[in-house]
Image (cartoon, helix red, strand yellow):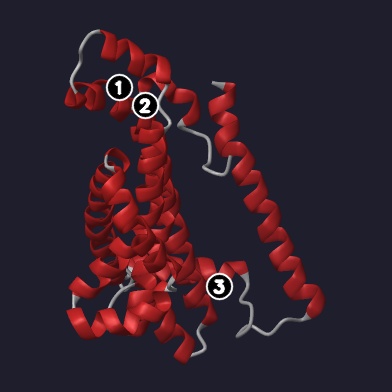
Amino acid sequence: MTERLSTFLYPLLTFSILVAIWKMSIVVFDVPDYILPEPSRVLMSLKEGYIDGDFWPHVTHTLRSTIIGYVIGCAIAISVGTVLAESKIFEKSFYPFIVALQSMPKVALAPLIIVWFGYGIESKIVMVGLMCFFPVFVNTIVGIKHVDQSLLSMMKSFSANRWLIFTRVKLFSAASHIFAGLQIAVVLSLIGAVVAEFVASSRGIGWLIEASLANFNTAHMFAALFSLIVIGLVGTRLIQFLHGRFVFWDRARANVTITE
């Protein structure tokens, strides 16, 4: 109970300190409102945006493209990663090209994606899928390849076929690695959605930030950014929860951030 309470108290304490520093910096350095608004103004923008309902169409638009793109991108990443991990021929043939695609900045690809898929939600979904793909893909390959050799030997001694070894050993062994990739992909999916909305959109949180910039409404921009932060935190916690539920034999790693 104490550990669970500290999980919420420590971030809350840190957030309070950061807000206090934010407020003091404005007072001490006399920062203009259009550069850095006061926390109270940002809170007022959040209140007006959500109570009056102005923010909801933009938030739901971003959420829709993010969730669809995330699911599709991660599903393809797990499938392709599995095929490449199980086949040396496919790995040697396609892995260099996938790495080459990943090395290209996705921001540079955004205009091309708009040309190919249009200004609708399709281009945002593709952008999100591309952003999600690589971390899940790599973690899938690493997880499947780093299987306990003693387990493989035991399965082979029982004359288990390749499919049985994959479904009963490799897939379970790779589960924690895959969820690690899924956790990273949550944040990247939001980045992809916002970048696509910056380039071409008339709705979404990215468009809201750009519109606020044009009006020098910095408080509105901060309110939109805080909305993204909340969505990212909720998404990350959801993946951690699912990790603990489905990978029940490795719950200790479910709440560990993927930087180890």
Residue shown at the point (60%, 67%) measured from the top left: 39
Check the picture and name the quadrant holding the N terminus: top right
Residue 147 image position (x, y, % from top left): 40, 26
Q: Quadrant of residue 26?
A: bottom right
Residue shown at the point (23%, 52%) measured from the top left: 76
Q: Earlier in the sequence, mark 1 or mark 3?
A: 3
Q: In this orientation, which residue lies closer to the viewer: 149 or 188? A: 149
Q: Residues within 10 Å of mark 3 (few under 14, many from 20)?
A: some
For this view, does 240 lie left or right of residue 216? Answer: left
For this view, does 170 lie left or right of residue 251? Answer: left
Residue 90 image position (x, y, % from top left): 26, 50
**Residue linked to disc 3:** 41
- SS class of the residue under badge 3? helix
Residue shown at the point (55%, 38%) measured from the top left: 8
Q: Residues within 10 Å of mark 2 (few under 14, many from 20)?
A: many
**Residue linked to disc 1:** 169
Kind of residue indicated by mark 3: Arg
Q: Earlier in the sequence, mark 2 or mark 3?
A: 3
Mark 2 or mark 3, whichever is nearer to me: 2
**Residue linked to disc 2:** 173
Q: In this orientation, which residue lies closer to the viewer: 77 or 51? A: 77
Gap in angstroms between the C-alphas marked 1 and 3: 54 Å
The answer to whether the residues at label 2 and label 1 have Cβ atoms under 8 Å apart is yes
Mark 1 or mark 3, whichever is nearer to me: 1
For this view, does 176 lie left or right of residue 30? Answer: left
Gap in angstroms between the C-alphas marked 2 and 1: 6 Å
Kind of residue indicated by mark 2: Ser
- The answer to whether residue 139 is above or below residue 71 is above
Residue shown at the point (42%, 39%) measured from the top left: 142
- The answer to whether residue 25 is above or below residue 84 is below
Q: Quadrant of residue 72?
A: bottom left
